[in-house]
Amino acid sequence: MDKRMLSPKEIAEATVNVGYAKATKPSLSLFLLGILAGAFIAFGAVGSTTMGALVGDKGLAKLMGAAIFPIGLMLVIMAGAELFTGNNLMTLGILTGRYSIRDMLRNWVLVYIGNFIGAIVVALLVVKTGLYSGVVADTAMAIATKKATIMTSLGLGAVLSRAILCNVIVVLAVWLATGGKDITSKIFACWFPVMLFVLSGYEHSIANMFFIYVGKYVGAEITQTQIWINNLIPVTIGNLIGGAIVVPIFYYLIFFKYEKKSLAK
């Protein structure tokens, strides 16, 4: 019977190979693929917000919204795009010496800017459709205001913790999708972990670009300073800690450092 999924060790090796392809990809391609990823995540966020607004029961609304949001990562993984938070796994290739820090940072910067543009373009287009009105607009404004004032209400520690936990789960979703050898496996690999982080209330920098700006565009009274200082900058830092440090270091130590030492004995 055909093997349907890579082993954890094989996923680690495949992740390094994927990271090398990302590190050596032309800059324009990275930028354009970054725009697509920002738009794809925004598409999932549109569906999530709409469902959350239209379902009457609060708990069911959260569940339904969380179940729809993972479509964004599915599009990124299977249609092909470059997502900053998923690309945080590239530090695994740095630890193994496969490519340079400079190439990784080039990827992150271009992709982050592209993600922002993609998310903002979708936010503007959604507002132009007129579909963000009534209860959907109210929900979007409430989400944006809550996220843009989160540092004031919860403090830096809570924001960083939510962002760290978020990207631990997101990169694990990417990790599992890398191990899947068919489209069904990849769909489920994206779906359940991402649904989990949304249900848990964690903070994702790229998704927040859409959530906050679409709320601002439909009327939320928030400033650019609030958006970036209270949310996007600390959330991005937390996402980096969770996705670029915590998960890659654990798997580097397990599959590349200590396992090699064990085999050498």
Image: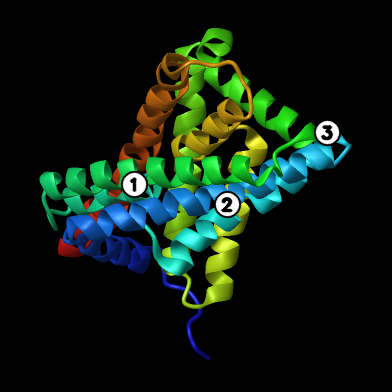
At x 40%, y 23%, the residue is 234
Q: Position of residue 156 (x, y in %)?
A: 45, 14
The alpha-carbon separation of the residues under discs 1 and 3 comes to 34 Å
Q: Which mark is residue 114?
A: 1
Give, as a three-letter code, the residue at label 1: Gly
* Residue positioned 48% across, 82% down in the render: 3
- Mark 1 or mark 2: which comes first in sequence? 2
Of 218 and 19, which appears nearest the observer?
218
Q: Is residue 137 left or right of residue 35?
A: right
Residue at image coords 73%, 44%: 50
The residue mark sitting in front, 1 or 3, is 1
* Residue highlighted by disc 2: 43
Q: Secondary structure at mark 2?
A: helix
Mark sitting earlier along the chain (3/2): 2
- The image quadrant of residue 262 is bottom left
Q: As shown in the figure, which amino acid type bears the numbered disc 2?
A: Phe
Residue 58, numbered label: 3
| Contact (Cβ within 8 Å) of mark 3 with mark 2 | no
